[in-house]
Image (spheres, grey):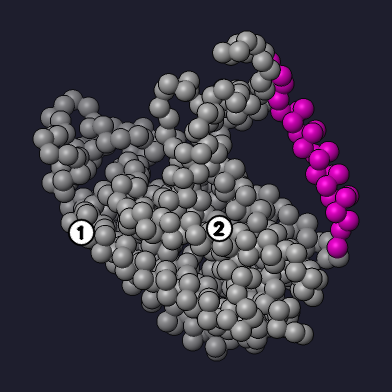
Amino acid sequence: MDQPARDAISQGAARPAIAGLGAPRLRLAAAEWGVLRWLLPLALAHGLLYLFLVPPWQHYDEPNHFEYAAQIAIGEGITPGDGSVQLSREIADSMYRHRFWPPGARPDLLGPGPVLLGISQRVHPPLYYHLIALPIGPTRYLAVETQLYLARAVSMLLYALTVLAAWRIAVVMAPDEPATQLAFPLLVLFTPAFADLMAAVNNDVLLNMAATTALLGAVLLIRDGPRPAALALAGLGALVAVLTKRVGLAVVPLVGLALLWALRRHPVRRRLVAGIGLAMFVVAGVAAFRPVMVEGPDGPHPVLAARSWLVAIDAAYLRLDIDNWIRSVSDPDLIGQRYQTLVVVAFTSFWARFAWGHVSAGVVWDWMFATLALAALLGLARGFFLRTRQAVPLWRRRCVWLFFGAVTLGWIALFARLHPLPPLEVGVYIPRGRYMFWAIVPTLWLLLLGLRFLLPAGWRLAGTWLLVALMLMFDLVALVTIAATLR
């Protein structure tokens, strides 16, 4: 096989370079244990840097995420009582002592009710919070900051497991390139905004780990067929994702597609797939929505409204205010420039915003990652039209399409979170890039793949390590920026 064919899409032939990779078992070979012995400690050490560097409560909604878990730890997980009032006062006092609020702002610690710490997180399923409550319970009489750091340590362990899952995905996707297998998990590990969030008390942490585990199971399903280990990883990962956060529903169709490809090992006619997909889309649309007329600046125009059964599901789990959500999505008068703002905010905060999103590494890095993303898109477009793609095994091409699907669903979920939109004169919360971290492995793999397609064959491995070095340098910049800004 010529060199371009070796590098296309998955970088190589189907034979595994590491003994035992193709077998449907979880036992690791000696070389894999060697990687595990340094990769796991490195991930834990890197997570510890962010765990202790970021001051208490300086992550997205961390006070309320911690409060939810601590209420479970003291036995008030369903109906908060007197213990929750005292807990909120302890958290608020700690936030004040660590200069969370601007100068002059003081929480009311003597009021009759609990101190308002922010937006309550009790709307989320309790799975993550029960997990975080495990170390909080035995230490609930210690300082609240100690409890917070122990809860962060649980998130840090999930971060390390996510890095290991990314490594295993790289082993599957690049079986004859040991260097790529090592470089890719380092790329995930050194992405600073991801590490920052994964060392926080936030249910996104469990979602990200579960989704990455499900994707590992999905690529194994596509490569090996419906084997028990792959089914367990994909199924349990998707289940935990759904039970952690509603955006975890995006993982379900990815696992379903992987299972379909696991059962259908041969190529399927594209026209047949497109026809079936279009038919399912139309049927689902008619079953879920109905047209209604609304008044707008230019007169009445049609929008969509949800049917009663979808409204019931929304009230029980989705919490989208589905009827207003559908009308908002189908009303261009409400969108205005908000989508453009969303793309900018989500992209920059995915790469170069930390803490509550208010710590920036600088506009230079924003432009750096925008340039890399554009270059990767051009490279992926070039790779799509290369004739050598036909030499790549079908299962590996399907895995790349699965990654495209994951990134696409991630962006769709971001736009969906923006709705329902208020009138244009009313401000609206713009979702941050952290909501895309469940798809960080597909995002980084496509980034790496696209950049490699732009390079000559002899430079592709060097380009991979150059990208890792760039991310490591940016990680160091992020650590210095966080320390200078928050300490």
Left or right: 329 as drawn, with respect to 435: right
Residue occupying image coordinates x 52% and y 73%: 184
Tell me the kind of residue under disc 2. Answer: Leu
Residue 413 occupies which quadrant of the picture? top right
Which residue is at a point 80% across and 33% down the rendered structure image?
A: 283
Tell me: 249 left or right of 96: right
**Count of numbered tags:** 2
Please tell me whether residue 233 belongs to the stretch shown in magenta. no
Q: Residue at x 37, y 58 (%)?
A: 364
Name the secondary structure under disc 1.
helix
The residue lying toward the viewer, choosing from 117 and 89, is 117
Looking at the picture, which amino acid does disc 1 mark? Ala
Secondary structure predominantly adopted by residues drawn in magenta: helix
How far from the left and from the top, in percent, is residue 202? 39, 49
Q: Which mark is residue 71?
A: none
Pointer 1 residue:
484
On residue 374, which mark appears? 2
Which stretch is magenta? Answer: 267-292
Of the residues under marks 2 and 1, which one precedes in the sequence? 2
Q: Position of residue 42 (x, y in %)?
A: 38, 76
Which one is nearer the viewer's eye here, 13 or 318?
13
Quadrant (top left, top right, bottom left, bottom right) of the N terminus: bottom right
Task: Kindly tell me whether residue 116 is visible in this rendering.
Answer: yes
